[in-house]
Amino acid sequence: MTHLSEDTELTVTTPDEPGIFGRVLGTLANAGVNVKALYVYSEEGQGHFHLVTSDSKKAETALRTLGYKVKAKKVVTVLVTDRIGAGAEIGALLGNAVIDIRYSYGSSAGEGKTLLVFHTSNNRRAVDTLK
C-alpha cells in the first residue's frame, strides 16, 4: 500500500434540493478544508454526504453552522497504485482476517493512484492487516 491510515469520515445529512452539492462543498472551501474523498447520494428527500477531508474538526464546525446534521466516524483510507486487481487484493486480505467491509468507495483521477475508503467491522485490525 502506498499510504494507509485510519481517518475520520463525516456523514452530513442535508435537504435534497438544487444547489446543495455546491453549498456543502463551497462551505468547506471557504473554511480552507480540502475534500480528499466523497460519496454523495439523495434518498427520501434528504442529501447524504460521506466526506473525508484534510481537517475533519474544522469541516465539522463549518458544516454545523449551516444547521445540518453531522456525524463523525472512523474509516480506513488506502492510497494504492491504480492497477487491475488492487481492490480485490485488499478485499481478500480483509476477508482472510475475518474483517467485514461494511461499505467502501473510491476513485482514481487517472494519475496512477486510487484512493479507497473502507468502513469495516474493525478498522484498527484492518489497518494492521493491510500494513
Image: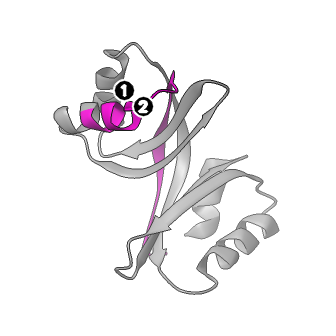
Residue at 38% in and 79% down: 110
Let me know if residue 8 is in the magenta part: yes
Residues at circles 1 and 2 in contact by the CB criterion of under 8 Å: no
**Residue 4, x across and y down, in percent:** 47, 63
Kind of residue indicated by mark 1:
Glu
Q: Which residue is mark 1?
A: 60
Residue at 75% in and 73% down: 92
117 sits to left or right of 52: right
**Residue 69, x across and y down, in percent:** 49, 18
- Using the image, determine if residue 53 lies above or below residue 99: above
Label annotation for residue 77: none
- Quick one: SS at disc 1? helix
Q: Which color mode does the image show?
A: one colour
Of labels 1 and 2, earlier in sequence is: 2
Residues in magenta, as a range: 1-26
Label annotation for residue 18: 2
Q: Residue furthest bottom?
A: 84
Residue at 54% in and 30% down: 47
